[in-house]
Amino acid sequence: MKKNIGLLLLLLFAAVSFYTCGEEPIQGCTNEEAENYNPVAEENDGNCIFARDKFIGEFSGTLLCGTPLPPMAEFTMVISEGLSGNNDVQIEFKDTDNPLPILDGTAEGNLITVQEASYQIALNPDAPEITTEVLMSGTAEISEDGNSITGTISATVVPFPIPVTCTFTATR
């Protein structure tokens, strides 16, 4: 009987030792859209970093455009999380004479790309109820230290196929 209890305890100890000495799952970011995606990670550690994260915030700067958009304007740019994917952003230019639409973009690395889309814009600040269709697209690049952004916005007023390019610089 004592032999059986000893053998049973030995088997129980071996089973517990085998179970607790097994390899722990590899921790890391398991989201393929993240900049720190770990393809060998088996369990998400909750520390995924997305390209958009470095852009999110408020920047102040100067927007330099040609007609029909505001020729030069000081502005505040607010970049926030987009509505769909993990690297989508929304870019809002505030404090400009003519309100600009909120642009949807995608962040990858240090660059945001705004694909061409159609927006209704009031080109005359004295008649905000009159809007014109404008096609807009653009890019923005953030500095390595994350404190400044430079970029361009292209706008084409639909009845006139001549694009206008605006440049901007902004800092946090």
Image: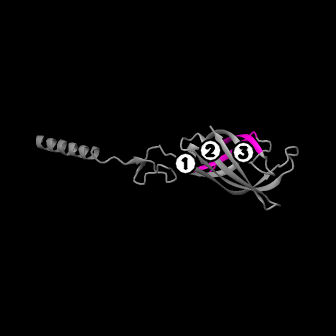
Q: Residues within 10 Å of mark 1 (few under 14, many from 20)?
A: many
* Residue at x 80%, y 60% (from the top left corner): 158
Q: Nearer the viewer, residue 165 or 91?
A: 165
What amino acid is found at the position of numbered circle 3 in the picture? Leu
Residue 52 lies, in percent from the top left, at: 57, 47
Specify the farthest residue to the right: 127
Given this view, does label 1 or label 2 mark the residue nearer the observer?
2
Q: Are marks 2 and 3 in contact (CB under 8 Å)?
A: no
Dot label at residue 63: 3
* Residue at x 59%, y 51% (from the top left corner): 111
Residue 84 magenta-highlighted = yes
The residue that disc 2 covers is 149
What amino acid is found at the position of numbered circle 2 in the picture? Ile
Task: Tell me the element at label 3.
Answer: strand
Part of the protein shown in magenta: 72-95
What amino acid is found at the position of numbered circle 1 in the picture? Ala
The residue that disc 1 covers is 51
Residue 157 lies, in percent from the top left, at: 80, 57
Q: Nearer the viewer, residue 28 or 117?
A: 117
Q: Nearer the viewer, residue 122 or 140?
A: 140
Dominant secondary-structure state across the stretch colored magenta: strand
Residue 62 lies, in percent from the top left, at: 71, 42
Tell me where residue 92 sits by quadrant.
Answer: top right
Q: Quadrant of the N terminus?
A: top left
